[in-house]
Image (cartoon, helix red, strand yellow):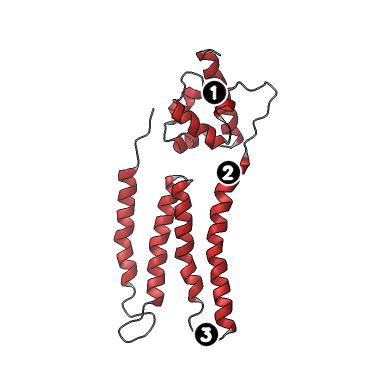
């Protein structure tokens, strides 16, 4: 296979699998941190991504590098291997669900033994930031940085909510009189996260 044939094979596969995933050129480009013009060149067989990007594309489509570089048969249907995609969704969701299962079990035990009945529902409140922490970890490992940004934001406000509800005031009442300040503190934290995301975002490659 010469250079031209390789470009054409990769181009056909990118087009086929992209459409199978119902992605636009811009959406695919965003996932790869490239411009849609670059993706358009690849799909017209005018350019070939480097090996690192080819590996990213193959992983995204759930295929091997060999499959990406092999010209598809004329009658072949592009099938995306959903197992990897499903795992990247189901595993984090199930892991986050464990936090809620633990909260349900704890609530049931506290209710059954009539312990801490006034605040036993707090276990569900604590499950909120815990589940966001779990999803944040998986988003850093597997998902797009956009999800990481969203889960960090959710975690900031979830922690503020928990502190607002459970921290007693000087007079011992719950929630405390000045607990709204936890939300005030969350505002600059959110702003800092936005600025960090803007600073961290690499420029798109052509």
Which residue occupies 53% across, 60% down?
Answer: 96
- Give the distance between the C-alpha atoms of the residues marked 3 and 1, in whole angstroms: 63 Å
- Find disc 1 in the rendering and name its residue: 10
- Image coordinates of residue 170 in percent, x first then y, are 30, 84
Mark 3 surroundings: few (<14), some (14-19) or many (≥20) residues within 10 A: few
Q: Which residue is mark 2?
A: 85
Image marks 3 and 2: residues in contact by CB distance under 8 Å: no
Q: Is residue 169 above or below residue 60?
A: below
Vertical order, 10 against 150 (above or below): above
**Residue 25 seen:** no
Which of 55 and 159 lies nearest the eye of the viewer?
A: 55
Q: Earlier in the sequence, mark 3 or mark 2?
A: 2
Q: Quadrant of residue 106?
A: bottom right
Residue under pointer 3? 115
Question: How many numbered callouts?
Answer: 3
Residue at image coords 32%, 44% = 200
24 lies above or below 123: above
Q: Secondary structure at mark 2?
A: helix
Q: Residue at x 34, y 57 (%)?
A: 190
């Amino acid at each position: 296979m010469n250079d031209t044939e390789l470009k054409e094979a990769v181009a056909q596969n990118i087009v086929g699998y992209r459409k199978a995933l119902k992605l636009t050129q811009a959406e695919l480009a965003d996932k790869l941190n490239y411009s849609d013009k670059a993706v358009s060149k690849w799909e017209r067989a005018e350019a070939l991504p480097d090996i690192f990007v080819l590996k990213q594309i193959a992983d995204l489509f759930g295929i091997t590098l060999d499959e990406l570089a092999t010209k598809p048969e004329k009658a072949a249907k592009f099938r995306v291997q959903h197992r990897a995609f499903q795992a990247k969704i189901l595993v984090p969701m199930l892991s986050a669900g464990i936090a809620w299962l633990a909260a349900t079990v704890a609530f049931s035990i506290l209710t059954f033994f009539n312990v801490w009945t006034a605040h036993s529902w707090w276990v569900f409140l604590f499950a909120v930031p815990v589940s966001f922490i779990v999803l944040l970890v998986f988003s850093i490992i597997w998902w797009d940085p956009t999800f990481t940004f969203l889960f960090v934001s959710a975690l900031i406000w979830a922690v503020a909510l928990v502190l607002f509800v459970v921290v007693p005031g000087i007079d011992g009442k719950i929630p405390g009189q000045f607990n709204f300040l936890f939300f005030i503190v969350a505002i600059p934290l959110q702003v800092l996260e936005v600025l960090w995301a803007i600073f961290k975002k690499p420029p798109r490659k052509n």
